[in-house]
Image (cartoon, helix red, strand yellow):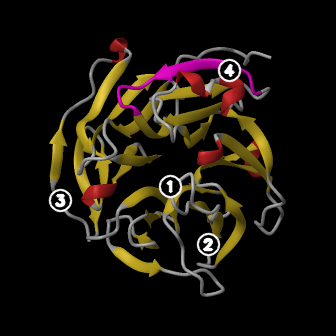
């Protein structure tokens, strides 16, 4: 149920500064989503979703959930992805829990639901990452939650599937394969299933790993603008890599937090909202939610 609790009361800094703080002390913030002028984001260790429209308010909370993303679903409702409790929760527009999804159509559960992206058919693609360990088996998956509530696994065998975003007008799905340091591309079939994935871009081809300070650095959240430019959050490196449709690096945004988790463009595409933590070891993993100016906004065409 909705909890009218103020997390923090802070307005945005003047736009001309090029940066404003939405939440200067968030706790492992993840999965930002703009909807109807409000920003929603998850705070995993606090087991809550926060809504911001000038003030941060708790929108939804469930002990043990550990949410990592929220997606539009079921008209004006949402679906929350519980990384800790391995389930999905349908939430209405007022923040009330409607139902939980704990297994796919075959009765199999999910391992660490993570990022999500809604399509124009009322459904949602989401990742279930598996174990975040270079020595662990490659058990990352991608699922599709239909508008009718049917959940199908549409890709598997990924080395920690993470960020996910629709591309080319919904004809393709891009997925971060975090521990492989690459983004995969899937053709979307008419029934919502995916063709076999293929590499879209390897991060080392555009941003060498030799510059990094973290052994598990890799692509996390993804975003695409109306020109087809891809924004890749590089977790562990504290930067956003912006690639043209030709997969050329055309911009880099530095974030204040090393463990950059995700990104959301506002409707104007002038602003990027970034979420992330400065610490991913010591609970409760302090971090920030910031709004930064998009360095390629206003460019008439992406670099070739």
State the residue position of label 1. 132
Mark 2, residues whose alpha carbon is within 10 Å: few (<14), some, or many (≥20)? some
- Helix, strand or loop for disc 3: loop
Closer to the eye: label 1 or 3? 1
Q: Looking at the image, which residue is at 65% across and 61% down?
A: 138
Q: Alpha carbon of mark 4 to alpha carbon of mark 1: how far?
A: 27 Å
Q: Looking at the image, which residue is at 68% across and 72% down?
A: 153
State the residue position of label 4. 249
Quadrant containing the N terminus in the rendered view: bottom left
> 65 or 158, which is in the foreground?
158
State the residue position of label 2. 147
The boundaries of the magenta stretch are: 247-258
Q: Does label 3 or label 4 sit earlier along the sequence? A: 3
Q: Does label 1 or label 2 sit earlier along the sequence? A: 1
Task: Kindly indicate the quadrant of the structure image that contains residue 161.
Answer: bottom right
Magenta stretch containing residue 11, yes or no?
no
State the mark number for residue 41.
none
Q: Looking at the image, which residue is at 44% across and 29% down?
A: 238
- Vertical comparison of 300 with 237: above or below: above
- Helix, strand or loop for disc 1: loop
Q: Are marks 3 and 4 in contact (CB under 8 Å)?
A: no
- Helix, strand or loop for disc 2: loop
Q: Alpha carbon of mark 4 to alpha carbon of mark 2: how far?
A: 36 Å
Quadrant containing the C terminus in the rendered view: top right
Q: Does label 2 or label 3 sit earlier along the sequence? A: 3
């Amino acid at each position: 149920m909705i909890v009218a609790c103020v997390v923090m009361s802070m307005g945005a800094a003047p736009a001309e500064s090029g940066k404003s703080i939405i939440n200067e002390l968030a706790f492992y913030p993840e999965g930002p989503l703009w909807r109807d002028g409000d920003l929603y984001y998850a705070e995993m260790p606090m087991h809550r979703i926060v809504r911001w429209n000038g003030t941060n308010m708790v929108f939804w909370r469930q002990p043990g959930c550990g949410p990592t993303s929220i997606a539009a679903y079921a008209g004006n409702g949402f679906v929350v992805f519980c990384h800790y409790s391995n389930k999905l929760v349908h939430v209405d527009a007022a923040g009330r829990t409607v139902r939980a999804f704990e297994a796919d159509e075959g009765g199999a559960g999910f391992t660490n639901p993570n990022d999500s992206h809604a399509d124009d058919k009322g459904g949602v693609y989401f990742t279930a990452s598996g174990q975040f360990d270079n020595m662990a088996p490659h058990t990352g998956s991608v699922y599709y939650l239909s508008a009718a509530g049917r959940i199908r696994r549409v890709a598997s065998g990924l080395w920690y599937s993470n960020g996910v975003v629709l591309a080319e007008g919904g004809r393709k799905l891009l997925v971060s394969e975090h521990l492989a340091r690459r983004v995969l591309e899937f053709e979307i079939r008419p029934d919502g299933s995916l063709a076999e994935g293929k590499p879209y871009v390897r991060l080392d081809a555009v941003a060498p790993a030799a510059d990094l300070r973290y052994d598990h650095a890799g692509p996390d959240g993804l975003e695409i603008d109306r020109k087809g430019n891809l924004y890749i959050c590089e977790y562990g490196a504290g930067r956003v890599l912006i690639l043209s449709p030709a997969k050329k690096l055309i911009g880099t945004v530095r974030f204040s937090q090393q463990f950059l988790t995700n990104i959301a463009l506002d409707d104007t595409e002038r602003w990027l909202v970034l979420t992330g933590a400065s610490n991913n070891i010591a609970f409760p993993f302090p971090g920030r939610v910031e709004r930064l100016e998009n360095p390629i906004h206003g460019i008439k065409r992406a670099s070739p």
